[in-house]
Image (cartoon, grey):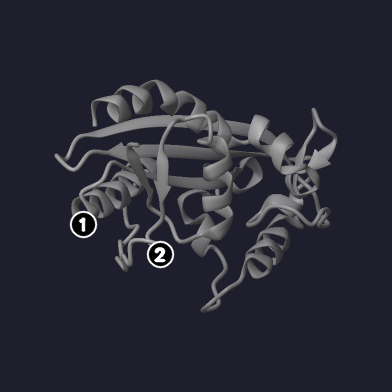
Amino acid sequence: MPKLLIATSNQGKIKELEALLKKLDVELLTPTQMNLQLTVEEDGKTYQENAAKKALAYSRESGWLTLADDSGLEVDALNGAPGLHSARYAPKANATDADRRRYLLENLKPKPRPWSAHFHATIAIATPQGQVYFAEGNCYGEILPEERGENGFGYDPIFYFPEAQKTMAELSSAEKNRISHRAAAVKNALHVLRPLLSAG
């Protein structure tokens, strides 16, 4: 069975990607399983650059086809912030997801609602030979001033999805995997992944 390395240590992302990729006839590997401990500086100017850096680094180190993603929350009232810096948005050291949500809401307080926003995901698929392929996905909604829901991670408890009338954190895993930005990016990546896996 072909193998695909998921280049992240974020357990929330791993869980989502495993569910999204289960239709593929592939063995999914994680850095922990492979004893891979790489530090990849996410200093790119775009989601594509960051995703490609991670995918290429892990693919070179492991010798396997590798999938990495870079994603972010873009809030219109904050001119697209936190964007690329979503995972490092709060100014305090060792900030938690809750710290980042609080900091975002503090910055939004003076701005008129609704606070329209979207999640963006870019997936990079790297081969051990150094080729990289990309796929993208978006999910549109708005930011709420209070947290709702227990599922998900990151900004999910304050990201409201109007069509479902729920926050991302109120959606079941199955619902989220139908409508999320990462789900859209994975769906767009499948036409690249399938031939690469069958060739591999």
- Which residue sits at x=71%, y=37%? 174
Give the label on residue 32, or none.
2
Placement of the C terminus among the 4 image quadrants:
top left
Tally of numbered tags: 2
Q: Which residue is mark 1?
A: 61
Placement of the N terminus among the 4 image quadrants:
top left
User: How far across and down, in percent of the image, does residue 65 sit?
Assistant: 28, 41
Q: Secondary structure at mark 2?
A: loop
- Mark 2 to mark 1: distance in Å? 13 Å
User: How far across and down, in percent of the image, does residue 129 sit?
Assistant: 14, 39
Give the label on residue 24, or none.
none
User: How far across and down, in percent of the image, does residue 62 sit?
Assistant: 24, 54
- Which residue sits at x=34%, y=42%? 3
Q: Amino acid at mark 2?
A: Thr
In the displayed orientation, state which residue is furthest to the front: 1
The image quadrant of residue 89 is: bottom right
- Which residue sits at x=19%, y=51%? 60
